[in-house]
Amino acid sequence: MGPITRDPFKDPNMHTTSSSHNNRSSLRRLLRQKRRQLSSYEQKVASYKACQRVSQQAWFLNASNLAVYMASDGELDPLPLALKAQKMGKRVYLPVLHPLNSNHLLFIRFTSKTPLHKNRFGILEPCLKGYGLERINSCKIQALDLLLMPLVGFDPHGGRLGMGGGFYDRTLAVKPNQFKRPKLIGLAHECQKVDQLSLEAWDVPLTGIVTPEEFYLPQ
Ligand SMILES: Nc1ncnc2c1ncn2[C@@H]1O[C@H](COP(=O)(O)OP(=O)(O)OP(=O)(O)O)[C@@H](O)[C@H]1O
Ligand SMILES: [Mg+2]
């Protein structure tokens, strides 16, 4: 029997090489540790500063539909920005684990009345229970102007390392010219920066990264 060939886009457990898998895993562990070491005061200041920086950008001011996330595990918290955007009359969305399309995300409208619950990863997300899919106030990824993304690590060239589920990568995966992607902005602490991530074929690069100290805009 010949060697079994595995398609990286069909096998969620496959990485190109086991050494890249090991590197990614150990880098994730290290960077997650670093961001969890920030005190709650440092977290609050970081969130305030990064949200201020985002709120001055034309791509934020001009966005009508934007998605944020509920921070966990020491991620930079975009909640102040979400509340500001809601007050400005923008439509704000949160990702939920897609109930039908496994390992993909669905973006659900987030208002002051949206009931939230913890998903299987312990992350708060809008509760879909009791709603038929046709009654869910969701937004297609193509209709989002701006997607603010959590990350474990980034490089100044737009490389992004997430938690390792491939959820954002799968949701954003498209054939060339299939649709215009929203602006993809990673939110991070400075301690999550590395010089250069080694990326895989499926990793979708970021348009920019905002930290409390900088706005990185890859050329
Ligand atoms: N477009 C895709 N189609 C199918 N599988 C994918 C796709 N993108 C990523 N994956 C799978 O998901 C797994 C995790 O990917 P990766 O390590 O890039 O996660 P991540 O970027 O850290 O996570 P996330 O996107 O949730 O932030 C990989 O093993 C990969 O095979
Ligand atoms: Mg990835």
Image (cartoon, helix red, strand yellow):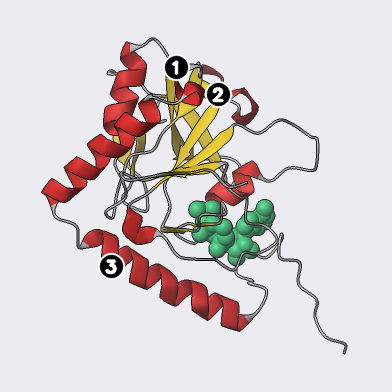
Image position of 15 (left or right of 139): right
Kind of element beneath mark 1: strand
| Residue 12 visible | no
Q: Of the residues shown, which amino acid type is indicated by label 3?
A: Gln
Image position of 195 (left or right of 53): right
Q: Of the residues shown, which amino acid type is indicated by label 1?
A: Arg
Q: What mark, if any, has residue 91 been given in the picture?
A: 1
In the image, residue 168 sits, relative to residue 82, either above or below, namely below
Q: Residue at x 16, y 49 (%)?
A: 42
Residue 122 x %, y %: 31, 51
Label 3 Cα neighbours within 10 Å, binned few <14 / some 14-19 / many ≥20: some
Residue 206 x %, y %: 56, 46
Label 2 Cα neighbours within 10 Å, binned few <14 / some 14-19 / many ≥20: many
Quadrant where the N terminus is found in the figure: bottom right
Looking at the image, the residue that sits furthest to the top is 89
Q: Badge 2 is on which residue?
A: 139
Q: Residue at x 41, y 33 (%)?
A: 68
The span from disc 2 to disc 3 (Cα, nearest Å) is 33 Å
- Foreground mark, 1 or 3? 3
Marks 1,3: beta carbons within 8 A: no
Kind of element beneath mark 3: helix
The span from disc 1 to disc 3 (Cα, nearest Å) is 33 Å
Number of residue marks: 3
N-terminal label among 1 and 3: 3
N-terminal label among 1 and 2: 1
Image position of 24 (left or right of 71): right
